[in-house]
Every structure is written in structure tokens, then in C-alpha cells.
Image: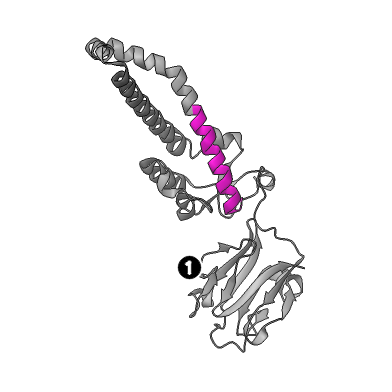
Amino acid sequence: MTARLATRAILAPDASNKLLWAASFLDGMLILVAMQILGPLMIALIDLASPWLATATMRLDANLRGAVEAIIGIMSFVLLLIMYWFVTEILLGGRTFGRMCLMMELRQRGGEVPTMAQLTKRGMRKFVTLGFSGMRVSGLDRHDEKNGLAWASPLAPGRLSATRNWKIQVLNGHYAGTSHVVDRLPGYKEKQLITIGRDPAWSNLTLDSEERVSNQHALIRSGTRGWEIKDYGGGRGSSNKTYLNGRPIKPGFWQVIEPKDAIAIANVKIQLVPV
């Protein structure tokens, strides 16, 4: 599985979103082709099942008959779409024609294969709303986000790459203008963690002059998804929270840091940048 994941990197939300829209277009084309093939068959079946309806339709004037045929076409498209979504989102765990063409696979945010419970919950929510309630112009699909899932594909760049050549900068407060090469932080190579807080015995990025920062405030790590941050606070969550792009991070959960994300440890702004 490790080798497979190496070629199918977890996608950044914007890259994932663009590929999902492209996949939806391919799925729509497939359904339209299916309608062209199945349409005459469906009309023939309607004629056989209800000769009276077929005769009544033929007696309508051309404009009205065209409107009826258009309504039947729309209803047929919706019916096919519902059947398609049921099979692909629930029975096949999100494997649609378009996504398979783009080599997209669902993964947990850490890169692991999704559990059956995650796939079932996600599939049911998407099927009930035909996916519309989860769609976004940019960013990760809401249903995927709520179920801790992401997409992997070799066709688009992965997340912010986790390499050795990074530094962490402090942008404001008592330590404004200071920067630290990640690999040179005390204990980083052994623990593979950036520990941020006021307690110098625990932190390798110490902000002991910042009163709003907790003793053991936050953690940053480099994982399969790139850089990730967690609000820690000794395991219970920090008093003054950790923020990503102005939004507080839920304590205890790793949150992916995308390029150019704004990070705040309480009121102290920091940034990860290449060396």
C-alpha cells in the first residue's frame, strides 16, 4: 500500500475540487450517451405498456408534443442520474466513471484506505442530495471533509510538500522577525515534531514571553499529507486556541496546512516557508 500511495498523492483541496468538477462533467457525458442509447428503448417500452398514452401523445399538436417529450427526457435523465449515484456512491464507494478516468481514489486524510463506515455515511449523504449539498466552487467537498476523507490521484500536485528545507517564522509579538530552520529545532529529528508553547522544557519553538500562549500550546508535524498542525494544550486544547486562516482548530485533530495558510498560536502569527 505504501508504494501505491507514493504514486497517488493526497490532493490539495483546490486540486481535488478541480478534478471532481472534471469528473462530474465526464459522468454527465456518460449519462447523456446512455440516454441516447436507452431513450428509444424507453419510448418503445412506454408504447407497449400504455398504448393509450402513446396514442394520446401523437394526437397533440407539435409544440405540446415537443414539451411532453422534453419533460419525459428530463425525467429520464434524473432517473438515470439517481440510479447512477446509488450504484457509484453507495455500492462502489465513490468510484464513478469520471473519477476512474482521472485515477482518483478516496483516502482518509492520513492516506489510509477509508473504512466501510466512512464510505457508507458519505455515500448516503451524497445520494440523498445527489451531491449538490456538498459541492463547492473551491476547496474540499463538504461530505468528504465531514467524514475525514480526501482524494488521491497522480494527475495533480499533492499538498504542501514535506521536505527538510523549511523554516518557521514568527511574524508578530515579542519574537517578531525571528526564524528557525525546522531540522535544527531541538529534538525535532528524533520526534519529527515542532512543539510550540511557553514551557521551554517541552517546546522546541518557545514563546515564553507571550502571555496568551499556553505552556504546551500546539504541535506541527510533517506527514503523508504534508505539513499538519494540531491544537494541543496538554491534550485538552489550549486556552486561547490555535487558528488557521482565522478559524480555530478543533483540539486534538490534525489539520493540513496549505501553502500560504495563515497560522496563529493564540495571538502570535507564524508561517512555514521554504528555506
Question: On screen, 107 above or below 212?
Answer: above
Q: Residue at x 51, y 33 (%)?
A: 27
Q: Residue at x 43, y 31 (%)?
A: 84
- Quarter in which the N terminus is drawn: top right
Q: Is residue 198 magenta?
A: no
- The answer to which image quadrant residue 83 occupies is top left
Question: Residue 111, how many percent across, how many down?
Answer: 60, 51
Question: Residue 218, how many percent across, how many down?
Answer: 57, 74
- The segment highlighted magenta reads 11-30
- In this picture the colour scheme is one colour
Q: How would you rate the neighbour count of disc 1 (Cα within 10 Å): few for under 14, some for 14-19, many for 20 or more?
A: some
- Which residue is more in the foreground, 205 or 258? 258
Write down the residue under mark 1.
250
- Quarter in which the C terminus is drawn: bottom right
Q: Residue at x 54, y 33 (%)?
A: 26
Q: Residue at x 30, y 11 (%)?
A: 47
Q: Secondary structure at mark 1?
A: loop
Q: Amino acid at mark 1?
A: Lys
Question: Magenta span: helix, strand or loop, mainly?
Answer: helix
Count how many numbered circles sit on residues in the image: 1
Question: Residue 34, how many percent across, how many down?
Answer: 47, 23
State left or right for residue 259 relative to residue 125: right
State left or right for residue 59 relative to residue 253: left
Q: Is residue 21 magenta?
A: yes
- Which residue is more in the foreground, 211 or 117? 211
Question: Residue 9, how many percent across, how many down?
Answer: 65, 49
